[in-house]
Amino acid sequence: MPAKHSLIHSGETQPIPRSPYAWSPLPSIRTTIHPVLGVSNRPSLMYDMSRHISTLRLSHPSLSPRLLAEPATQPPMHSLTIVCPHLPWPINVKARKRNGYITVADVMDGLYHALRPNATEAEFRSLSHDLRHQVNKAYQQRYRRASLMDYAHEKAQGVRRVDFLGGRNTFMGLSSTKGGARVWRLNVS
């Protein structure tokens, strides 16, 4: 005689009862940005993006530099995209460590390396007359603020991508977008 709970009775198979949980979708996990990268009127990371990445500072002595090695998002991700209404291109950030996750430092380093190159002539010409004027003004302000040692070099280099921010170079944090968990908005002032 077959066992009471057996699926086989008299040589015939019975349908397996379906669990009410077998097809339930997994709960969606909301992706959040690390608090030091989050948008704020008083950002935890003080950074003028027209300057070298080495000038980045933590806003309070209680914040540990070890924060820079922490995951930029929860859950951790391998890549993300940063958009800004002042920039005509997205900034793609990838984890520096192979098979790793993006850290807070990766995000800040990614911003620096995306904004530091010279703007191409095509990028500059794609702007309206008014925006070109703003970018030129930001370029002049940037090289005039340079040290005496760097002044001539910065002036000779011409317009950099950071100048497209129109002088709004202060990192104010990242905020979510409608683009999904991998797309974040760069807020500047």
Image: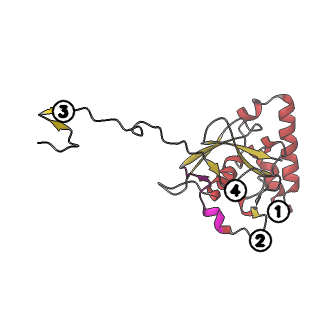
Mark positioned earlier in the residue sequence (1 or 4): 4
Query: Residue 105, percent across and down?
Result: 64, 59
Nearer the observer, disc 2 or disc 3?
A: 3
Asked if disc 1 and disc 3 are in contact, CB closer than 8 Å, the reply is: no
> In the rendered image, which residue does mark 4 sit on?
35
> In the rendered image, which residue does mark 3 sit on?
13
Mark positioned earlier in the residue sequence (1 or 3): 3
Mark positioned earlier in the residue sequence (2 or 4): 4
Mark positioned earlier in the residue sequence (1 or 2): 2
Residue type at mark 4: give it: Pro
Side (left or right) of 106 relative to 14: right
Query: Which element type, helix, strand or loop, lies under badge 3?
Result: strand
x 39%, y 39%: residue = 22
> In the rendered image, which residue does mark 2 sit on?
61
Residue type at mark 3: give it: Thr
Span shown in magenta: 66-77
Is 70 magenta? The answer is yes
Q: Which mark is residue 149?
A: 1
Instruction: Say above or below: 166 vs 150.
Output: above
Residue type at mark 1: give it: Met
Side (left or right) of 155 relative to 74: right
Side (left or right) of 10 relative to 175: left
Mark positioned earlier in the residue sequence (2 or 3): 3
x 54%, y 54%: residue = 101
